[in-house]
Amino acid sequence: MSTKQRTGGTSGPARKSEFVERRRSDASTFEDRLWAELDEIPDPHIPVSLVEMAMVYDVSADDGHVDVEMSFPCMGCPAYDMIKNDVRSCLRVVDGVDSVDVDVVWDPVWSKDMLTESVREKMRNSGISL
């Protein structure tokens, strides 16, 4: 539920899809299930999920507690609280989850370069230019 600044982080992806692939690569089977659940939450402004938007940076689970690190495309996002609540609500109903913390981080800063080409295509098909 807190907002924190991560220090010593990476400065972002070298290529457009690397960030999306790297962030899930070390997930346990249970954490991968949590990622899949988060992939069902739509961005309220754009016809793609929060995971597709590369807003979810990390998901970790330990003994029933889940930590989600995420960012937003802009600091003044009008859906900031709604999205954080959607993330918590989505994961709290998963068997094995007792509590969920959502930490908003600004390092690395979200960038459209984090989007995969397939997400870019979805956005273009919906009339959104990048």
Image (spheres, rainbow, N blue to C red):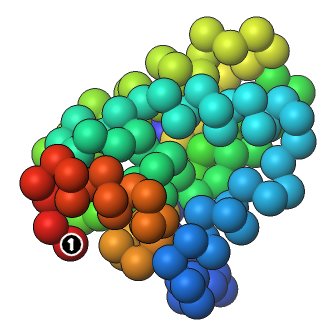
Above or below, 28 against 14 in this view is above
Above or below, 17 against 128 in this view is below
Residue shown at 73% from the left, 54% from the top = 24
Quarter of the image containing the C terminus?
bottom left
Mark 1 surroundings within 10 Å by alpha-carbon count, few (fewer than 14), some (14 through 19), many (20 or more) = few
Quadrant of res 34: top right
Quadrant of res 99: top right
Task: Indicate left or right for 9 with 28 as reference.
Answer: left
Residue 12 placement (x, y as % from top left): 54, 83
Residue 108 placement (x, y as % from top left): 50, 77
Q: Using the image as rendered, state which of residue 62 and residue 23 is in the foreground.
A: 23
Q: Using the image as rendered, state which of residue 96 and residue 126 is in the foreground.
A: 126
Circle 1 is placed at which residue position? 130
Q: Using the image as rendered, state which of residue 97 and residue 13 is in the foreground.
A: 13
Task: Indicate left or right for 16 with 9 as reference.
Answer: left
Mark 1 residue type? Leu
